Image: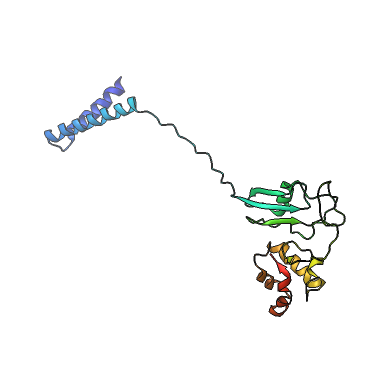
Amino acid sequence: MNEFQNQIQRITDWWYELNFSTLQKRGLLVLGGLVIVISGFWVTTGKSEAVIMAAPIEIEAPLVTVDVAGAVTNPGVYALPGNARVIDAIKAAGNSLAGTDLSDLNLARIIRDGEQIYVSPTEKTKIPAGRKFATKKTTPTGPLNINRATAKQFEALDGVGPVLAKRIVAYRAANGPFITLEDLDKVSGIGPAKFAQFKSQITV
C-alpha cells in the first residue's frame, strides 16, 4: 500500500512541476483519457484474424500429344506431360513388342507435341495375331520416310553408304524427327551435291 501511495505522490509531484499552463494540462488530461478509452475499446471488441497459410501451388507441365506407332503393344495417340521422353511414350503404348530392337531410337529424348514415334519391327519381333508388319528390312518402292527409315534403308539411297546412314539415324535419335527434307543438311557428310542425289527419293 505504501508503494502505491509513493507512486501516486511521484505522479502528483511530476504533474505540478510540469512547465505547462492550466489549459495545457487540461488538454493533456483529455488526450490521455481518449487514448485510454480508445485502447480499451479495441482490446475488448477487436477480433483476431485467422492467419491462412496458402499451400504451395504445384504447376503441372503442359500436356503434349504424340502418335506412337509400329511395333508397340497398343499403338495410338497419347497425351503425355511436356517433359516426357521417348521411353515414356513407348511405355504409354504398352511397351515395344518382344524381340524389337530399340537401338535406333534415342529413348532419353524429350518428346515434341504432334510428333510420331515409330518403333520399327525386326525379324525377331514377335508379332501378335492380327498385326501385320514387314518382317524383313526391304528396300521401299516409294519415297523413303526419313523419320522412320532404319540405317539399312538409308543405305539404299543414292550416294549414301553405311557410315553416312548411321550418322543420319544417330542425328535423328539425338535431335528428334526431321521437320523438312533440308534438315538432312545438318548431318555431317551431307552437302548440297549429295543431298541433290537422293532428294527425290525421300519424304517426311
What x and y, as percent, mark residue 187? 71, 71
Instruction: Give the quadrant of the C terminus.
Output: bottom right
- Above or below 58: residue 142: below
| 14 lies left or right of 201 | left
Closest to the observer, 46 or 74? 74
What x and y, as percent, mark residue 173? 73, 62
| 182 lies left or right of 163 | left
The residue located at (17%, 32%) in the rendering is 16
What x and y, as percent, mark residue 98? 84, 49
The residue located at (68%, 73%) in the rendering is 185
Q: Quadrant of residue 13?
A: top left
Residue that extends furthest to the top in the rendered view of this protein? 1
What x and y, as percent, mark residue 203? 70, 66
- Above or below 92: residue 119: below
The residue located at (27%, 29%) in the rendering is 38
Tally the marks: 0
Q: Quadrant of residue 161?
A: bottom right
| Residue 65 visible in the picture | yes
| Residue 107 visible in the picture | no
